[in-house]
Image (tube, rainbow, N blue to C red):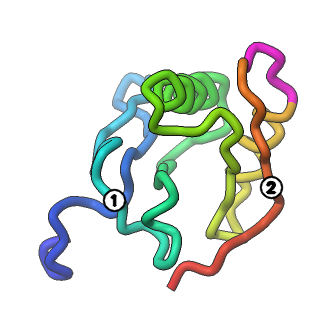
Amino acid sequence: MDERGWDDIGYNFILCNDKEDQQQIYMGRGWTYIGAHCKGYNNESLGIGIAGNYTGIKSLNVFKSLIQCGIMQNYIMKNFTLIRYDPSSKAYEYYLQYLRNDTDLQYNNQASDQTVSCQ
């Protein structure tokens, strides 16, 4: 961050475990500042980094609550598109399947199998 002259980390939010294996949401750039996570997409996207164990129901619920919060506050569109930039990551398929199958979600997620190239 300091070496590159950034004001903060590139992601808007990071999801990770704490010492008690509880999922936490850490704010990087937050809702109102443009991220620096994917060149060419920063102006029109929200960067959510996922660190650690992402395959538990706790991580899915925290992810879902962050998305719902963004929708309620009009920072995320109800018909958002979930796109990955790391094609080797298994987290994307895991979260994508969750969004497609969750009947509790009150929005129309346009999930995509698209991968973008962030340089």
Badge 2: residue crowd in 10 Å (few <14, some 14–19, many ≥20) = few
Please tell me which residue lies in front, 88 or 45: 45
> Which residues lie in the magenta part?
101-105
For badge 2, the amino acid type reads Ser
Q: Position of residue 24 (x, y in %)?
A: 39, 30
- Quarter of the picture containing the N terminus is bottom left
Q: Position of residue 50 (x, y in %)?
A: 51, 49
Badge 1: residue crowd in 10 Å (few <14, some 14–19, many ≥20) = some
Asked whether the viewer can see residue 10, the reply is: yes
Q: Which residue is mark 1?
A: 34
Q: In the image, what residue occupies the spot 68% across and 50% down?
A: 82
Please tell me which residue lies in front, 32 or 98: 32
Q: Position of residue 83 (x, y in %)?
A: 68, 58
Q: Is residue 87 above or below residue 46?
A: below
For badge 1, the amino acid type reads Ile
Q: Which residue is mark 2?
A: 112
Compared across the picture, whether 72 is left or right of 116 comes to left
Compared across the picture, whether 85 is left or right of 16 comes to right
Badge 1 vs badge 2, beta-carbon distance below 8 Å: no
Magenta stretch mostly in which secondary structure? loop
Q: Is residue 24 above or below residue 115?
A: above
